[in-house]
């Protein structure tokens, strides 16, 4: 991923630049202490990921993001933990507290790497979901994907993130698994694990502790087995 770093503190900026350069999946493009110069650069150059300080004079990191017509993946960096909750209103991939440790930096980078649409373009985490008949619209930042319900193979949840595994690829977005479950028809989908919802249509094989969908094993949680067995019996 092509990266830039923006921080008005030269020492903090130098640290992030060194972290970027030692991380194989990242390509360091430029570092900026002036947010206005960085904003001009972002307007004219493709960037996949921005490491962005929040508390800067004249123009904060959040104000900078609001000024952009399109938003790349953002990892906010700040010395003030109170900005944490607000940062996710701006589609932040992650929020790092200064002084930033490399292991925590790498965890945020890995999260950014995992957030890709089927076309491998970035999809931000500011997501909402609406249901329209036989499809659902998944909004990710400035992009919206229409997913046919019949194309969904299974859905995996991790914290407040979910990944749709479909016939056409993967789409990851910010949404709790419980919320999407409420919007899916119970006649076509079943939750079989705390982290998985599956499409009943696409089940290939059912075993005692797992199902296979496109030869991919999906575990059946102990607490879900009885209800899942009842669902399968009712489908016969």
Image: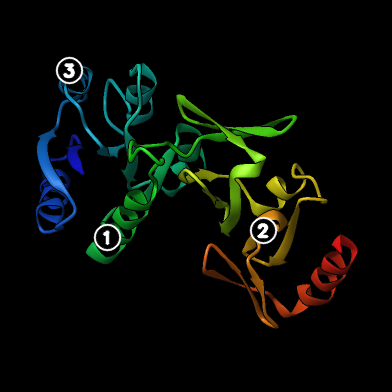
Q: Secondary structure at mark 1?
A: helix
Residue 120: image quadrant is: top left
Image coordinates for residue 167, horizontal then vertical, percent? 51, 47
Residue 92: image quadrant is: top left
- Nearest to viewer (mark 3 / mark 2): 2
Disc 1 and disc 2: Cα gap in Å? 29 Å
Residue on which disc 2 sits:
197
Residue on which disc 1 sits:
106
Residue on which disc 3 sits:
44
Q: First in sequence: mark 3 or mark 1?
A: 3
- Nearest to viewer (mark 3 / mark 1): 3
Residue at the image position 21 percent from the left and 44 percent from the top: 1
For the residue carrying disc 2, how many other residues have a C-alpha within 10 Å: few (<14), some (14-19), or many (20+)? many
Q: Are marks 3 and 1 in contact (CB under 8 Å)?
A: no
Image coordinates for residue 109, horizontal then vertical, percent? 29, 53
Q: Is residue 218 left or right of residue 229?
A: left
Q: Nearer the viewer, residue 31 or 99?
A: 31
Q: Nearer the viewer, residue 14 or 220?
A: 220
For the residue carrying disc 1, how many other residues have a C-alpha within 10 Å: few (<14), some (14-19), or many (20+)? some
Q: Is residue 205 left or right of residue 231?
A: left
Residue at the image position 20 percent from the left and 19 percent from the top: 36
Q: First in sequence: mark 3 or mark 2?
A: 3
Q: Secondary structure at mark 3?
A: helix
């Amino acid at each position: 991923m092509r990266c830039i770093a923006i921080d008005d503190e030269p020492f903090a900026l130098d640290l992030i630049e060194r972290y970027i350069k030692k991380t194989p999946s990242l390509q360091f493009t430029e570092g900026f202490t002036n947010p206005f110069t960085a904003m001009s650069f972002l307007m004219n150059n493709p960037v996949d990921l921005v490491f962005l300080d929040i508390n800067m004079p004249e123009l904060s990191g959040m104000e900078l993001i609001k000024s952009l017509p399109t938003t790349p993946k953002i990892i906010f960096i700040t010395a003030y933990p109170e900005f944490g909750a607000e940062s996710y209103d701006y589609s932040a991939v992650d929020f790092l507290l200064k002084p930033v440790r490399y292991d925590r930096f790498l965890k945020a980078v890995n999260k950014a790497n995992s957030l890709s649409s089927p076309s491998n373009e970035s999809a931000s985490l500011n997501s909402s979901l609406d249901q329209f008949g036989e499809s659902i619209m998944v909004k990710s930042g400035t992009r919206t994907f229409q997913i046919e319900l019949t194309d969904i193979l299974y859905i995996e949840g991790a914290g407040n993130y979910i990944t749709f595994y479909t016939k056409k690829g993967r789409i990851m977005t910010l949404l709790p698994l419980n919320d999407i479950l409420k919007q899916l028809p119970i006649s076509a989908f079943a939750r079989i694990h705390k982290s998985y919802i599956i499409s009943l249509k696409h089940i290939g094989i059912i075993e005692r502790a797992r199902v296979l969908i496109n030869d991919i094993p999906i575990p059946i949680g102990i607490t879900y087995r009885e209800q899942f067995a009842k669902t399968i019996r009712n489908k016969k």
